[in-house]
Image: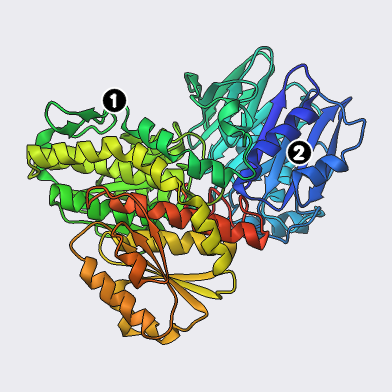
Amino acid sequence: MCGIVGYVGRRDASPILVEGLQRLEYRGYDSAGVAVVNDGSIRVHKAKGRVSDLLAGLPKRFGGTIGIGHTRWATHGVPNEPNAHPHLDAEGRIAIVHNGIIENFKEIRGKLQSEGVAFSSDTDSEVLAHLISRSKAEGLVEKVREALLSVEGTYGICVVDRDTPDTLVAARNGSPIVIGIGEKENFIASDVAALVRHTQQVVYLDDGEIAIVKANEFQTLGLDLSERTKRSQKVDWDVGTYDKGAHDHYLRKEILEQPEAVTRALSGRLDTRFSTSHLGGVELDPKEILRIKRIQVLACGSGYYAGLAGARLIESLSRIPSSAEPASEFRYRNPIVDPDTLYIAVSQSGETLDTLRAVQEVKRKGGMVTGIVNVVGSSIARECGSGIYLHAGPEVSVASTKAFTSTIVAFALLGLHLGRVRDLSPSDGARIINALSSLPDKITETLQTEEQVADLAKKYLDSTSAFFIGRVNGFPIACEGAQKLKEISYVHAEAYPASELKHGPLALVCPEFVSVVLFPNDDLYDKNVSAMEEIKARNGPVISVGHNPELAAISDDFVRVPSSEPELDSILINIPLQLFAYHSALIRGVDIDQPRNLAKSVTVE
Ligand code: G6P
């Protein structure tokens, strides 16, 4: 979603801003813009479409050693040039970029219009530029503060003022802002991806904080302008980890990276002596673990499907009743927060607003919450205060692949940890440890199915729809398989529990409707065969994914994957589904890494 960059230093700002915006493209956006301050004036250049469109039209003389940039994902007002950020006040004195939503903008806009202010966009954000400029407060930071006190909603902002040409002011409430610390230059961004080419030393702003950033120094304040001392930290990910390398798409790169991602997720966390796991970030002592009566996972999108898989996994390893719910549903239904429930927030980006709000709701009601997050230092990770980092490396493609897999691995580690304090026997613990240790090699082996799966994507090119059918451990994977296919190839796809087929969806089965039936290594094999037979009896073509060679004879197409333990098998079954979605998108010639209408990190309601 929307992205912010800011620069102040000695170098020409605009190439740094544009390059920073390119690094944020993966988040999804529909227009972009930059503003620089030079010789007592602010120059703005914006474009609808891609950062490359912005760059193509960028005037040759666009000098200035301080500036701000933005990629916009439209919320209020269509994607066009006037609505793109940065926004100026009426006199062209202040320029702002804003992520988030100003909820009371209509009221403020009406009031400002009645005072004679002319607006140049339909956005909620523009009110901020006018409010800051019209503030009677003394300095820039005081003016920004006054403006922020009169708005309701969420914001991450960065501001430049033509009369204070050595200073960026940034602030955060619900939308991330990070300061990048350089040598005689400093940066602002909404995502470290925009900074890592220049510095790995960063300071994260917390909600309700303002930063004053100059080339040689920065200061962080509360909204009451009291000093907040903050330490800088080093980001693990360097610029190389964001590169596509020789791959045509980030999605394929990230699918192929899964063996290493899983190795990193496991690294230093398996304890063969006591057949358990060590999770340094999960601060639960055995007595607390024994008190847990329920586990509830809260997440969105693929994180939610990983959560469904994770809840089943944890329940089977620890025998603690576990479930998953979309974080957005949870936060709006006035949930009963039980002190004996462990809530687990899952988020690749750590910035999904619905998940963040769900965590805050749990905490506000006195609940116990921990996180499974990929991005270190992200809002959800910090709000949870404890949890498991995935260490999957940056995931750039909008559709999640390696983070999905690593999340299930993290659940397995947590299930092992909780289970070994409760009912899981040492031998079962050892069985799970062995299975986890062999996962990276088995994933590598499963990735060998790519050529066969690519042929299947061609064979079923004319299918207008697809069913993904799974049972128990297979069902969350069926959900993720359907999600992957629809989000990147735009083929209509739905997931059903195998036994639900006959209760309605079977009506749709016909030769043009392919079904992908999943056969994890569990004792439900025969039942899954029956579900497949129901489809075949209605002339529906079936691709089966599993490890029993018999499936080759009884389905139209069979993708064989190695088997693991029943609890972990679905991780392997999911990999051909990722490849199927990728190749289905590839032959359709669509934008695989940035599917239409979607964003990587959904930081709005
Ligand atoms: C967006 C993305 C999905 C992602 C979901 C949750 O909808 O398009 O790919 O699964 O957000 O993101 P998170 O970063 O919280 O895991």
In the picture, the disc for residue 95 is 2
Mark 1 or 2, closer to the camera: 1
**Residue at horizontal 43 percent and vertical 60 percent from the top:** 481
Give the percent coordinates (x, y) of residue 377: 45, 31
Q: Nearer the viewer, residue 56 or 553?
A: 553
User: How was the colour assigned to the protein in this rendering?
Assistant: rainbow
Question: Mark 1–mark 2 contact, CB under 8 Å?
Answer: no
Residue in view at x 14 percent, y 51 percent? 320
Q: Please tell me in which quadrant of the rendered image residue 570 appears.
A: bottom left
Residue at horizontal 18%, vertical 62%? 523
Q: Nearer the viewer, residue 134 or 446?
A: 446
* Left or right: 154, with 83 as reference point: left
Name the residue carrying label 1: 268
Query: Can you see residue 107?
Result: no
- Residue 187, horizontal then vertical, whole percent: 65, 25
Residue 275 occupies which quadrant of the picture? top left
How many residues crowd around disc 1 within 10 Å: few (fewer than 14), some, or many (20 or more)? few
Q: How many marks?
A: 2
Please determine whether, in this image, residue 133 is positioned above or below residue 337: above
Amino acid bearing label 2: Ala
Instruction: Indicate the amino acid at tag 1.
Output: Gly
Marks 1 and 2, how far apart at CA: 48 Å
Residue 541 location (% of width, % of height): 44, 76
- Left or right relative to 133: residue 280: left
Q: Secondary structure at mark 2?
A: strand
Circle 1: element type: loop
At which x and y percent is residue 531?
Answer: 30, 76
| Residue at the image position 77 percent from the left and 16 percent from the top | 10
